[in-house]
Image (cartoon, grey):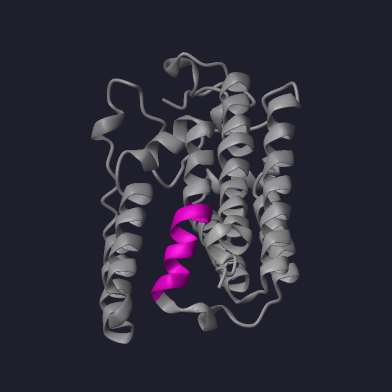
Amino acid sequence: MNGQVPGIPTWQPYCGDAPSPAGWLLQWNFDPLLIGIMALLVALGLRQFPATARSQIALLAGMLVLFVTPFCALGSALFVARSVHHLALILVLAPLLVKAVGTRAFGGLSVAAATVLETAILWAWHVPSLYDQALSSSLVFWIMQLSILLSAAAWWASVRKAAALEATAALLAQMVQMGLLGALLVFTGRAVYAPHWLTTSAWGLTPLEDQQIAGLVMWVVGGGAYLAIVSAMLWRTLGPASQPRAA
């Protein structure tokens, strides 16, 4: 499904070749090494952190969805699926990982340093040349996934330990950087991710449309998630429930 055109390399993404709409639900990833590592990590986690078993099981379920189910292969076809994948790592799996193993596992980074680190890693993997390498090398693919997940987990850990004002500022900073990255993808005017130049037409999209939808997902869904968290935090801090009752 990746086709071959002179001057354009043939990509070999970890999750498999880009599927067609008719067959993508059958394209599961039963990598025995991946499944074995996940099972080992959960077994060790349940032994070391029995009080957080629910979080560990939820984390495993999220990993199965992202890396074993056909959604994994969908990211080989559509950049918008890859964007949803990255948002799930940052907004769902990373906080679950922090809850499963505790904040101390991620060191003592300040919330400002953690914000800079996560932003730098996320933006770096959206540089077209690095993204191209991640979709043509299983090793680079896993470096991308783990660096995004672990930097996001370190950020969530730092936010949980920060004072309310610092945590709010960090959440707003993430909302802004996610919106900027999404807007850049929407308004750049050309498709910049070569692995998807030949894979989107089967899904009724041009490569540019796929990229623009992905940008909107990051801008609206990603930025909106941070805004919702900030709003909930401020409501909890400043809302009626926090006000002292009259005598």
Q: Predominant secondary structure in magenta? A: helix
Q: Relative to 26, does residue 156 appear above or below in the rendering?
A: below
The image position of residue 78, as x and y in percent, is 49, 30
Of 240 and 112, the residue lying toward us:
240
Task: Note whether residue 194 is visible.
Answer: no
Between 128 and 210, the residue placed more toward the observer is 210
Q: Residue at x 74, y 33 (%)?
A: 184
Above or below: residue 229 compared with residue 4: below
Residue in the image at 51% along x and 24% along y: 4
Quadrant where the N terminus sits is top left
Q: Quadrant of residue 208?
A: top right
* Magenta span includes 98: yes
- Image spot of residue 83 (x, y percent): 54, 40
| Residue 243 in the image: above or below residue 48 | above
Q: Determine whether, in the image, residue 36 is placed left or right of residue 126.
A: left
What segment carries the magenta color?
A: 89-100
In this picture, residue 72 sits left or right of residue 117: left
Is residue 1 shown to the viewer in this render? Answer: yes
Is residue 200 shown in magenta?
A: no
Q: Position of residue 55 (x, y in %)?
A: 34, 67
Please give the name of the residue rendered at 59% of the width and 41% of the height, measured from the top-left corner.
Answer: 224
